Amino acid sequence: MHRTVTLLLNIAHAIDHLFLLIFATAVAAIAKDFGLLRWEDLMPFGAGAFLLFGLGSLPAGKLGDQWGRRPMMLVFFFGIGTAALLVAATQSPWQLATALTVMGAFASIYHPVGIPMLLQHSTTPGAAIGVNGLAGNLGIAAAAVVTGFLVEHAGWRAAFALPGLACLVFGALFWWRVPPESESPSQRTRKAGVQLAPRDLVRVLAVMTVASASGGLVFNLTTNGNGQMLGERLAAYATDPSTLGLLLGAVYAVASVAQVIVGRLIDRYALKPLWLAIVLAQVPMLAVAAFAPGWWAWLALLGSMIFIFGAIPFTDATIVRFVDDRMRSRVAGLRLAISLAISSAAVWALGPAVKAAGFGVLFAVMAGVALFNAAVLLLLPREPAPVRVPAKPV
């Protein structure tokens, strides 16, 4: 049963990221269907989804702790699947914006609810976060590959409708296979793995939130803009949506492995030096991607995404290491509400920014944001490394 629950929660993470990036992958086709001349003019209509993805995390986390994580996950599956069907039925940019915003509200449930549910009984949380992160980023890869294929062969509406129907099926499976909880998380007494003084804990959570917001800006700008960036840089080599989707999906699939490696390192070492090293490595890779031509741009993008994805596990690892299980969903919800509400501005600004300055300037700015993120992480207090997990005898 534990394996089944883990599998379904990891699938839910893939679904969450897949649905949020269908629009970014299909935006050129949608803009053409709605009669707009440029995809950049339609991009701001997707900002509401990411705004609600952040703001909705706060009530989702509170309900997850006080009502229960299983019922909230059922709301996630059925809500996001139904919202995707609504997006497929829209006929104008403002209808699209409304339906995407509703989808973002349901998508906000997963991170403050699903990840604490996954980790509540884990003895190796870093490894669990790494595999879960791999699943989420494979969802990003699937968004590029599946959406590109469906847009080319069945139209952009099918790119929302078919995954929406699949999500409803997974919701029914989750209801059938995952047993009800015996108590709500807020009634539990399990303590955090590392106990900090209240002042140090506040400092850690504040740094984590700021780092998450700045890292989220880089994540949203890249994952929402990479498809169009590759279309521009590889215009002489790949022009159809399917080929570009495969190239972008390959980037995400390879980069996702970084989260598994980082997750295992998190179980063995202190967070601060690991987190700082990975964020610093983003700076030169993004700087190269800003100006690299052709296939060099693809390689630079691959290197950038390896370290951008590699930084993702640290925020959830920080919460599970320092926060009691009875309030993890609320802490995660608060962190996400602040950081994702800020980083959602990236989706609104992406189209106008690229239209005005181009991808070169955009990637150079992201390198600066990554450098700022590293400076923030220097403020983390020192913490003892967790007890090393002994290797199992062969």
Image (tube, rainbow, N blue to C red):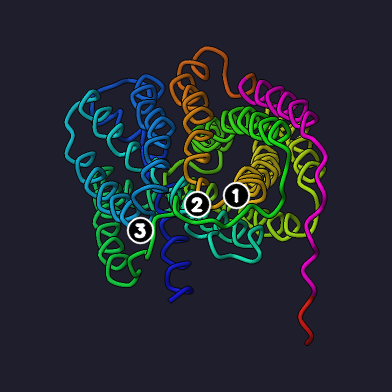
Position of 306 compared to 80: left or right? right
Q: Position of residue 125 (x, y in %)?
A: 63, 60
What residue is at 24 percent from the left and 43 percent from the top? 83
The amino acid type found where label 3 is placed reads Arg
The type of residue carrying mark 1 is: Val
Circle 2: residue type? Ala
Asked if residue 314 shows in the view, the reply is: yes
In the image, residue 329 above or below residue 190: above
Residue, disc 3: 70
Identify the secondary structure beneath mark 1.
Answer: helix
Estimate how packed mark 3 is, as few (under 14), some (14 to 19) or many (20 or more) residues with alpha carbons within 10 Å. many
In the image, which residues are magenta? Answer: 362-390
Q: What element carries label 2?
A: helix
**In the picture, residue 155 is in which quadrant?**
top left
SS label for mark 3: helix
Label annotation for residue 251:
1
* Residue shown at 54% from the left, 36% from the top: 226
Which of the 4 quarters of the picture holds residue 181?
Answer: bottom left
Q: Mark 2 points at which residue?
A: 141
Q: Which residue is drawn at 38% across and 34% down?
A: 56
Residue 4: where, in percent of width, then height?
43, 73
- Specify whether residue 292 is in view: no
